[in-house]
Amino acid sequence: MNAFSDTTQNVMTQTAVTLEELIRQTGSRARVAARTLARAGSEAKNQALVAIARGLRANAEVVFEANRRDVERAIARGLTPAFIDRLTIEAKTLEAMAQGCLDIARLADPVGEIVGMHTLPNGMQLGRMRVPLGVLGMIYESRPNVTVDAAALAIKSGNAVLLRGGSEAFESNAVLGRIVRSALEEAGLPADCVQTAPTADRDFVGAMITAKGLIDVIIPRGGKSLIARLEAQATIPMIHHLDGICTTYVDKDADLEIALKVTDNAKTQRYSPCNATENLLVHSAVAEAFLPRIGRIFADKHVQMRCDERARRILQEVGIETRAADPADWGTEYNAPIIAIAVVDTFDEAVDFITRYGSGHTDAIMTENLSTARRFLREVDSSSVMVNTSTRLADGFEYGLGAEIGISTGKLHARGPVGLEGLTNLKYIVLGNGQIRI
Amino acid sequence: MNAFSDTTQNVMTQTAVTLEELIRQTGSRARVAARTLARAGSEAKNQALVAIARGLRANAEVVFEANRRDVERAIARGLTPAFIDRLTIEAKTLEAMAQGCLDIARLADPVGEIVGMHTLPNGMQLGRMRVPLGVLGMIYESRPNVTVDAAALAIKSGNAVLLRGGSEAFESNAVLGRIVRSALEEAGLPADCVQTAPTADRDFVGAMITAKGLIDVIIPRGGKSLIARLEAQATIPMIHHLDGICTTYVDKDADLEIALKVTDNAKTQRYSPCNATENLLVHSAVAEAFLPRIGRIFADKHVQMRCDERARRILQEVGIETRAADPADWGTEYNAPIIAIAVVDTFDEAVDFITRYGSGHTDAIMTENLSTARRFLREVDSSSVMVNTSTRLADGFEYGLGAEIGISTGKLHARGPVGLEGLTNLKYIVLGNGQIRI
């Protein structure tokens, strides 16, 4: 008998209900819980987070056992080693989840912050107060640690959350969800602030993304095909991340030492993240000086270079092997040791390239010219626009947000790394002494 | 030959294209124009706004003529006098549009504003820059003045806009659109920053609200049935206004003179706006003192009172006529001289009532008690939450935003009155000198 056994969501034992009914039940409970959580003080929320960490550590064996069953089924179904790797909860994965909860407990509470308070001509004071969004719907794939990470961010930001992880991680997520719910109750908060999907049925996702009035925002995490499919069908707004086609542009006025160090880092520090640079643009005035040096670094690290004609010629002249770039290469997110390289003659050409092929995620310019830097910051419409730094730094932790639920490439609400603030919004507050409309 | 005849959108002369093709063409042109407009300086945008005002005044007769044809058709179709009234452009309507453009020209340009710049431990500077959203899709009903008002707000906020007004106002909107486009060209900006729907086909709306990648946000203005229909079908995020069920709560610690003045104003200053109060709650400790006084005012103004049992008894005792409230009354937006009245015994009961029946638009408390006021501000999750002021003051102009494209009752992006800032978002900007990811 575990400490959390009595907080199991009771819908799990129900059978003869439709998905619509199931989402209505789950969503209604989330809505009620969200109201209490929105008004909860920082202390109760932090207590819950500390209790989750404690619960994870105390129930480690139960988690590993459930996870082992998920992993065994996944192996039996012939899923890839990479998939199994993401699905597996090791001791260090569990400890990272626990530590994450403690880290989030230490962050400032965003809820209740008052900004922009000022007095209007009629004497009333107008400002805005930061409030939770309400009920989050989180849709993700194989990694069960998202269950805890997302629950912790939701709790701290005062939002209820409905968690729908990959069906392959169903048992792991159910156990993690029960630990979280038990911790919420321990802190005097409603267990229904966090609910895991009551069914592994894949159609539950479809019910979530159209559950108007029950869920306020959908936050998907996963591969591009999942996100694109959700985006085509969702009638609830989403905070989501689509593509990470990031460009680093080495301007004619670049400090080439900085450009070399930063470009190398932006491509090779890690290949798989969405903020790794996929396209390198070099101004023709510095191409002969810069390309052979960066080309040598890439060649040594076995990074394949897919080049336009001019870049190719320059690199060939110094004996560096390249491939001819295909037009499709400029718009491809490799997440691999591959980089597309082109030479441009003007700043405008670089910005046009980024506008055309980039995904609005993160783009960087290397330049020492102030006017050029200012134009780049203004004219490139990406969620992060950088001068003389590595695109790999576009990240909630690097930005000091303390946590991150994802990186938004959408245009509304939050752009870029989304931390606690992105899970809140501002309502107007007005203080008066009898002001009326005239 | 009018000044603007050569800027007519050429799609209007095309015939054999599908709606999907039409939205693709229109949207693509908007996207290209949006890029230029996003980078435009304040001067060019303000020049365009001044030129619109000039164009409206210079072409007044052409506008009236087109409008007359729309009005004649509407009369022939037997549309209501109220509808005809909204459709009609009088000299003062036209002048108000022109003046609106000049007012917006005088507002500060939101685009390019930099907020929160600070230095991170690794020495890089991180901040956020205000940028346009991209392409707006505006869907509205009979009032043709929205064409100019929305175009002016879009231009100033750096967004291209696709305007789809009511089909009954098609000719009026087309002429107004041409005046705006001519003004844009005069200021050296792309005419395609503002496009009116190229067809009166009602299915064009359906094509707009699902035009992913072409339109960044849909902003509907109109009756609840229109908004609800769009909300059910749109796959593009919306900034929209659904219901205006506003409550004024007179607490036990209210200053009854203030409560009287404010409640009267909140209900009777005008009956039709969305921020007029529909529900009045009175704490039982002050009900006997307050209700007869406000009841007398309402009775004199022929405001029908639909009351719960206790309110009814108190009013009956002093000879004020009331009706028994139906449960449906608490959740009804009357937009009429009708008010629902209930007596509550506690603050919590009042907040629960608002949470249950309100629409999250605007709610006010009358109280002199600081702790009660603070709890109300925190616990009521509406786009505007007020203390001792009239709900009628929840308005972009009253809030000093200088302009308003609508009042959002959604939870994401902008809540409450939406002015220029609500039509923009913040991207991250990073300035460094060689920072890399470690």
Image: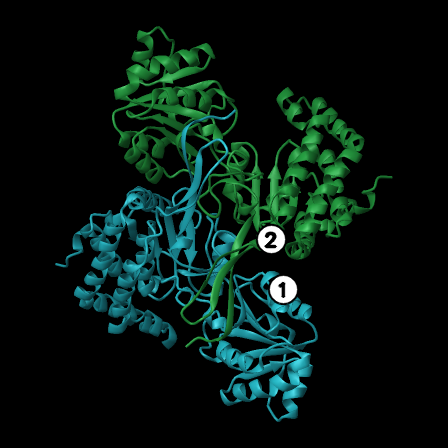
Chain colours: A green, B cyan
The front one of A423 and B428 is B428
Residue B264 seen:
yes
Residue B212, can we see it?
Answer: no
Q: Counting other residues with Cα less than 10 Å from the Cα at mark 1, is it few (<14), some (14-19), or many (20 or more)? A: some
Residue B326 pos. (x, y %) = 64, 77
Among the 4 quarters of the image, the one containing residue B280: bottom right
Q: Nearer the viewer, mark 2 or mark 1?
A: 1
**Residue corresponding to mark 1:** B375
Which residue is at a point 65% across and 70% down the rendered structure image? B350
Q: How far apart are marks 2 and 1 (CA)?
A: 18 Å
Label 2, on which residue? A134
Viewer-side residue, B253 vs B353: B253
Q: Name the residue furthest left.
A: B1
Callouts 2 and 1 in the same chain: no
Measuring from the top left, give residue A263's x and y in whole percent.
Answer: 41, 22
**Chain bearing mark 2:** A
Q: Which residue lies furthest to the top in this view?
A: A319
Q: Which mark is residue A200?
A: none
Q: Where's residue B41, x and y in %?
A: 27, 47
Image point 46% across, 76% down: which residue? A436
Q: Which amino acid does label 1 sit on?
A: Arg
Identified by mark 2, the residue type is Gly
B343 is higher (above) or lower (below) than B26: below
Task: Tell which of B70 and B88 is nearer to you.
Answer: B88
In which image quadrant can residue B222 be found? bottom left
Q: Which residue corresponds to the image point at 75% horizontal and 52% vertical from the top-left?
A: A188
Chain under disc 1: B
